[in-house]
Amino acid sequence: MSDNPYLSQVDYRDGIMPPWENQHLLGHDPVFASLKQRFEQGKNHHAILLKGSQGIGKATLAYHFARFIFQTTATAPNIPLFSHPNLYVLKRQLNDDRKKFRTTIAIKQIQDITEKLHQSPSVAGWRVVIVDPMDELRHEAANAFLKTLEEPPEKVQFLLICNRSAKILPTIKSRCMGVSLHDLDPDITHNVISHVSDFNISDEAIQNALGFFPKQPGQALEVYTSDLATLHSRVEALIMQALQGQNIDLSQAQALASEMQKKGREITLPIVMNFIWGSIAQAARSSAIAGEGGMADKLSQICEAITKTHAETETFNLDLLGALIKTLSAIQSVRMA
């Protein structure tokens, strides 16, 4: 068994610098400066909801702010952030057999954190709680977390990462200060990829990944490390079948899902869904530019259907094949309506 402590982290990728180690914050300096100023002036909100697209650096910003809080308040500033006793991170955990990660953040995790927050801190000073992301809390877990936000302990800063704001309970949003982060410029995305990668990625490979996610370096890196780029033509072929109203080739979809789940590739469901959504969104933009308003509207409706399907696949815990077929069926039904 490897002694690498990061292997138990759902967002850890071998060869890519994790956000808690990243000392460079690219593209979000104004937001970081504003958060620091509010904290220094004693005007910080106890719960900050960091909103924006997946893979743009929200987690990196959260860890930067946590590090700033510990250093500014002299709360054991010399302890490495990953092992800081006053930093609590809520993410999806490994299941009981430790072979796969759970699909949601469980209520037990919320209960454990809440109990710790009502005890004396390990080190005197501030404590920071990072939830990454909030949209992966089950409904009962979100309700339990709401109670903690309603009666926050002293000197606790909550940093809540949000990829899809529509999935956050309105009651939670009302108790947070929302901070929106923008997608990054392609040049900054390129720089982020070059910085956080331990391996040498050629400019050609970076440009290929940027073709999928030009403004979301985290997503682009997922494309590169999962090798989705080599399978994109097969994904697009299935999309075209659905767009043209053809019967979905189930054997082709099954074979593709199996390829995506091969050991060493293991392409995640969000990456596949985002790729399909991005392909349709790009087609919608092209149609609009070409003056094909009717087609652009139809494709926009398909994007909405894909978003809804993504939420349903998480709710019903579908596997990759089930989610792929459900998504293609949604595309097909909107296209033929």
Image: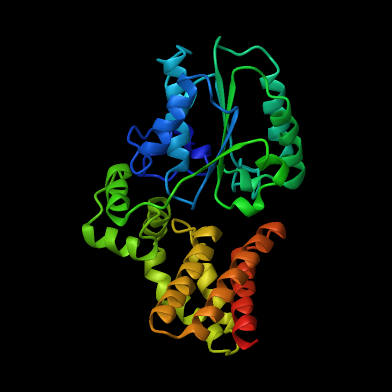
Q: Position of residue 215 (x, y in %)?
A: 38, 56
Can the viewer see residue 96 in this picture?
Answer: no
Q: Nearer the viewer, residue 110 or 58?
A: 58
Residue 244 against residue 186 in the figure, above or below? below
Is 130 positioned to the left or the right of 175 in the image? left
Residue 13 against residue 2 in the figure, above or below? below
- Say which residue appears at 62% left-offset and 81% top-offset: 334
Q: Quadrant of the C terminus?
A: bottom right
Q: Position of residue 5 (x, y in %)?
A: 48, 32
Q: Nearer the viewer, residue 95 or 142?
A: 142
- Say which residue appears at 43% left-offset and 50% top-offset: 182
Residue 78: which quarter of the image?
top left
Residue 114: which quarter of the image?
top right
Residue 267 against residue 299 in the figure, above or below? above
Which residue ends up furthest to the top in the rendered image?
Answer: 124
- Say which residue appears at 58% left-offset and 12% top-offset: 122
